[in-house]
Image: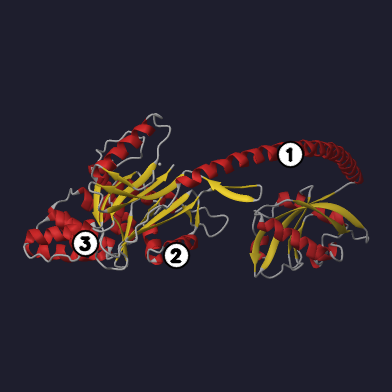
Amino acid sequence: MPEIQTGFEDILNNPIYFNRVFDESPESEIVWCTDGKIIKANKSFCKLTGYDPGKINSLDFWEFSEPDGKEEELDILATLGLRNRSDFYEKSMRHENGNYITVRVFSIPVEQINGRGIYHSLIQEIQITDRQNVEAERTSIEEDLKKQNENLERKIQDQTKDLQQKTEEISLLNLEQAGDHYLISLINGPLSVNENKSELCRTEFYIEQKNKFKFRNKEAGIGGDICITSNLRFGDGLDRHVLVFNADAMGKSVRVLNSTPEEWITEVYHELDSVFRAFNGSTAISCFLGIINEKTGDMWYFNAGHPFTVLYRDKTTSFIEHDLSLHKLGQISEHIFHVQIFQLFPGDVIVSGSDGRDSIDLSRTINDKIINEDEELFLDIVQKSEGVLDKLISVMRESGKPTDDLSLFRIGFQENDRPIDEKISHRHEHTTPSTILEDAEMNYKSGSFGIAAEKYEEYLLQNPDDVQVMVSLGICYKKLRDFSKSVGISEAAENLDPDNLMNLVNLADNFRLLGVFGKSRNYLDRALGLGPENRSAMKLNEILKSKGF
């Protein structure tokens, strides 16, 4: 046997690679190294190349290749390695007589030794007749492809002509449709007007319809969002009230009404609801309707399936609602209608709008598609904008792109901080537990969570086992973003009342905000077991599912 190259002894002694079958195989086989060393070649390979079997191991493998063939073959082998596969490739191989023969090579990587690749190659000579057959087949394929391309070109020309004709027809239809849309926008325009004349309680709104179009160089948009503000007077007509109506899908003028704000709002709700009930569920709208006394700050309102209303007070934002109290107008609801009452103080700002405020595309790249699902994002946007509508819109656009019709309204109550009515000129100080609790709950309902937390703490010093107050205090701390404090007081409440639904939901939300999703899921499952229809629990369930919990 010829001298064995150092490092190859294990391969030569391995019966998987070398045995009698290898030596006597009718196929030309060779095991070689990328540095050119020939480890072993069988008799058929020697016969194919014309070399003496006794001298073959002293040759360099690359001597069989054309002058520029080495780099090309190494590139082929590297490509096959990247694909994690083996395949045939063709090359020219030098015969002992100096001529070149065309061969088909099938190489299998064996292993790496000292950074050198070892290959086991099967080599077949390609006969002239094989080459002729291949060339004939290739010519036939090329002719078929040429005919197919000619037919395809004719089809493309015919389809292009049809497409141009249809495009012209569509353009005419689009022009007619744009004309119809433009007329609708002219009709809808007067329905969204800011006719509030109050200097004490100012209103602003912003509407951006998703469906935009151009008609005869005029740009406009149509959609389902509307905003209306106006003024009303009740009873003796002395106090002016501000009407705000925002809907995602009606009206205006100064009127003196022989009723109270609560009675008027109740009547309006039932009339609107009955109109949309006539559509048997096929049409429904969410809306906010509020009336504010410009002097006292009393606000009567209802929220029918609209996003929660935001209060901006003392540079802090909060929702004035915490649970769904009404479904959309036109929908069958298990809720009993009640007019909601909220107290505004000088400097307070109310901000809300349609669900387009939450439907924001947060994607940062074309490949991502992330639509906001966190309703508290809008709280942060209002906070950053300090309740100023123009700034709010800019901050919202920095966060992402609206994906739906968007309408926003802003109510600023006595923003010069000068109380007009004695009723709100000061907040009374209370000393008894019942009055402390009353003061705490008034601040809680009006969104002053910092003051409410102080009052709840003061009350609990005298009534340490009042679970419901502990739950409310836990929610206050969550609203103030002090999640650790919220968890501490809420867990204490859990020890006293393990099945308090509101407390379990608050604990689940706190752990979500802290990023402890497993614990959040445990508390939420307990809450859903107690109240499967609870709106806050259902929404939190969707958020956790989106995060894989």
Query: The residue tagged with tag 2: helix, strand or loop?
Result: helix
Question: Which element type, helix, strand or loop, lies under badge 1?
Answer: helix
Q: Position of residue 404 (x, y in %)?
A: 49, 48
Quadrant of the image occupied by residue 496: bottom left
**What residue is shown with label 3?**
421
* Label 2, residues with CA under 10 Å away: few <14, some 14-19, many ≥20: some
**Is residue 66 shown above or below 282?**
below
- Do the CB atoms of the residues marked 1 and 2 lie less than 8 Å apart? no
When asked about the image quadrant of residue 201, the answer is bottom left
Specify how the rendered protein is coloured: secondary structure
Q: Which residue is mark 2?
A: 391
Query: Of the residues under marks 1 and 3, which one precedes in the sequence?
Result: 1
Task: Tell me what residue is drawn at x 37 percent, y 64 percent.
Answer: 383
For the residue marked with disc 1, what is the amino acid?
Glu
Q: Are marks 2 and 3 in contact (CB under 8 Å)?
A: no
Which residue does the numbered mark 1 point to in the structure image?
168
- The answer to which of marks 2 and 3 sits earlier in the sequence is 2
Q: Which mark is residue 375?
A: none
Q: Position of residue 146 (x, y in %)?
A: 87, 41
Local secondary structure at mark 3? loop
Of residues 366 and 71, the one drawn nearer to the viewer in this rendering: 366
Q: Residues within 10 Å of mark 3 (few under 14, many from 20)?
A: few
Q: Residue at x 69, y 40 (%)?
A: 171
